[in-house]
Image (cartoon, grey):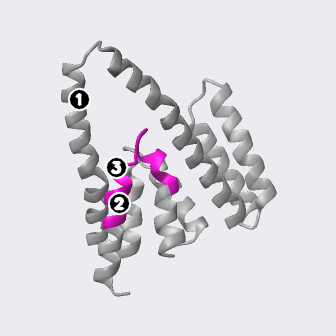
């Protein structure tokens, strides 16, 4: 495959994924993984997880990971193309939905729709978490430690009121000590 084919595959892939990103960019991570790792083989599980972790550590929206994926595939052009493909369609849909919601404010159909979208978003986000934990566990060679860190991190974020940044720092320290 040549660079033009890779760029087109990247853009068309993220155009489709953007329409599935109910719950935000994180909710579409399993589809991003399928595109980047399984379908095109542009990176492995560990590289995918590392780029996601890097995007999470940087200030800004979660969807910044798409730019890192695009950069990996096609450099600067890939970064901009992937971001535009991922954010363009959803921005248009969000604008249209916002306008429609204003007209249907308080309508029973709108309340039912919004309540119905919650479990879908939660399920997509949970699938993303499982995918990232699996990539971290089996991509590093330190599966038992990575699994333990993933479980402890999940419980910490779920049950405490502390910032998730504490988990990020602790996981990085433990990974540096035990996995490298």
Q: Quadrant of residue 4?
A: bottom left
Q: Is residue 38 left or right of residue 61?
A: right
Q: Is residue 142 magenta?
A: no
143 relative to 31 in the view: left or right: right
Left or right of 84 on screen, residue 166: right
Please report the residue visible at 77 percent of the width from the left and 60 percent of the height from the top: 143
The front one of 164 and 93 is 93
How far, Cα to Cα, is label 3 from label 1?
16 Å
Reading the image, the residue beneath label 3 is 19
Q: Is residue 141 above or below residue 119?
A: below
Q: Position of residue 174 (x, y in %)?
A: 71, 52
Left or right, 136 with respect to 96, comes to right
Q: Which mark is residue 14?
A: 2
Q: Secondary structure at mark 2?
A: helix
Residue found 39% across the figure and 25% down from its top:
114
Local SS, label 3: loop
Q: Are marks 2 and 3 in contact (CB under 8 Å)?
A: no
* Precedes in sequence: disc 2 or disc 3: 2
Residue 15 part of the magenta segment: yes
User: Is the N terminus in the top left, top right, bottom left or bottom right quadrant?
Assistant: bottom left
Residue extending farthest right = 144
Task: Name the residue that disc number 1 marks.
Answer: 98
**Range shown magenta:** 12-30
Q: Position of residue 51 (x, y in %)?
A: 49, 61
Q: Nearer the viewer, residue 102 or 44?
A: 102
The vertical placement of 129 against 38, above or below, is above
Res. 73 image quadrant: bottom left
Q: Is residue 170 above or below residue 31?
A: above
The crowd level at tag 3 (other Cα within 10 Å; few <14, some 14-19, many 20+) is some
**Residue at the front extreme, as displayed:** 109
């Amino acid at each position: 495959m040549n660079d033009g084919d890779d760029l087109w595959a990247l853009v068309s892939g993220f155009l489709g994924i953007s329409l599935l990103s109910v719950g935000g960019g994180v909710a579409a991570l399993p589809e991003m993984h399928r595109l980047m790792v399984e379908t095109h083989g542009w990176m492995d599980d560990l590289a995918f997880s590392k780029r996601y972790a890097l995007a999470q550590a940087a200030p800004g929206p979660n969807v910044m990971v798409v730019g890192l994926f695009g950069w990996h595939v096609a450099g600067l052009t890939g970064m901009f193309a992937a971001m535009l493909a991922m954010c363009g369609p959803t921005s248009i849909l969000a604008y249209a939905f916002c306008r429609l919601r204003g007209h249907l404010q308080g309508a029973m159909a709108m309340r039912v729709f919004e309540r119905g979208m919650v479990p879908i978003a939660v399920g997509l986000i949970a699938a993303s978490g499982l995918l990232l934990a699996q990539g971290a566990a089996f991509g590093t060679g330190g599966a038992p430690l990575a699994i333990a860190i993933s479980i402890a991190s999940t419980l910490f974020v779920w049950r405490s009121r502390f910032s998730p940044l504490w988990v990020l720092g602790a996981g990085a320290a433990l990974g540096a000590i035990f996995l490298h």
